[in-house]
Amino acid sequence: AQSVTQPDIHITVSEGASLELRCNYSYGATPYLFWYVQSPGQGLQLLLKYFSGDTLVQGIKGFEAEFKRSQSSFNLRKPSVHWSDAAEYFCAVVTSGTYKYIFGTGTRLKVLA
Amino acid sequence: GAVVSQHPSRVICKSGTSVKIECRSLDFQATTMFWYRQFPKQSLMLMATSNEGSKATYEQGVEKDKFLINHASLTLSTLTVTSAHPEDSSFYICSARGPLAALETQYFGPGTRLLVL
């Protein structure tokens, strides 16, 4: 069965430090992969997506993610975190045909001043 | 582009009443919309898939008579929580499948927080 795993429930980093949020997926075919961010009490905002091609994907707000087929991973990175990046981050994979999302359980990011 | 709105953003109702939540795609036509429920500090749970002009498809365990979904136009889907009870209190989020250029991408509304007293 298809699944998405975000191993880290909480991550705390200092402002200005680098960030990597992990995402692993289980999917038979080449997946469509997404990262979304959710601020408290808000909906989800699309950060970036990967469908094919270059495995390093650039997104909004200075985020990037790298697709690694051999590791079934799609980790999200940012070189220097800002206090405004504190939020919940969700990785998702699309199931082909139905276009339904399978979400990971999310990683809550806390940024220390 | 690809903006989705929800109304209301918050609603408080008495137990036993019904509540309607609207989801609109503002600048594109969405043949497919999705309704999610999110419990505090948890991920999103897909409740149903709404296709314009046809009946919604509900996920296993979701009561279709309790959560009525109507997708009467290409820009509007509604979720009605009927005979609401306190356990229905939650954060409800809709999304719309993207325009032709981005069918695989879902664009999410800001969510509706429902509190049933």
Image (tube, coloured by chain):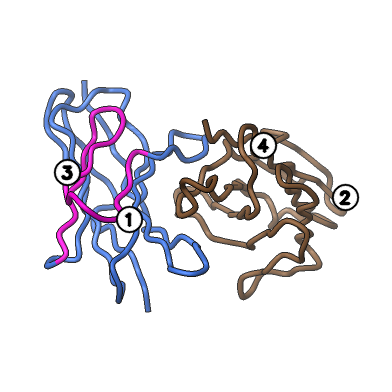
Residue B21 colored in magenta in the image: no
The image quadrant that residue A62 belongs to is: top left
Cα separation between marks 2 and 1:
39 Å
Q: Element under label 2?
A: loop
Cα separation between marks 4 and 1:
25 Å
Cα separation between marks 2 and 4:
20 Å
* Residue identified by numbered label 1: A33
Chain of the residue under label 1: A
Circles 2 and 4: CB distance less than 8 Å?
no
Cα separation between marks 3 and 1:
16 Å
Q: Is residue B14 left or right of residue A37?
A: right
Identify the residue shown where x is 21% and y is 53%: A53
Q: Is residue A14 above or below residue A29?
A: above
Chain of the residue under label 2: B
Q: Is residue B63 left or right of residue B36?
A: right
The image quadrant that residue A58 belongs to is: top left
* Residue identified by numbered label 3: A20
Q: Position of residue B51 (x, y in %)?
A: 69, 59
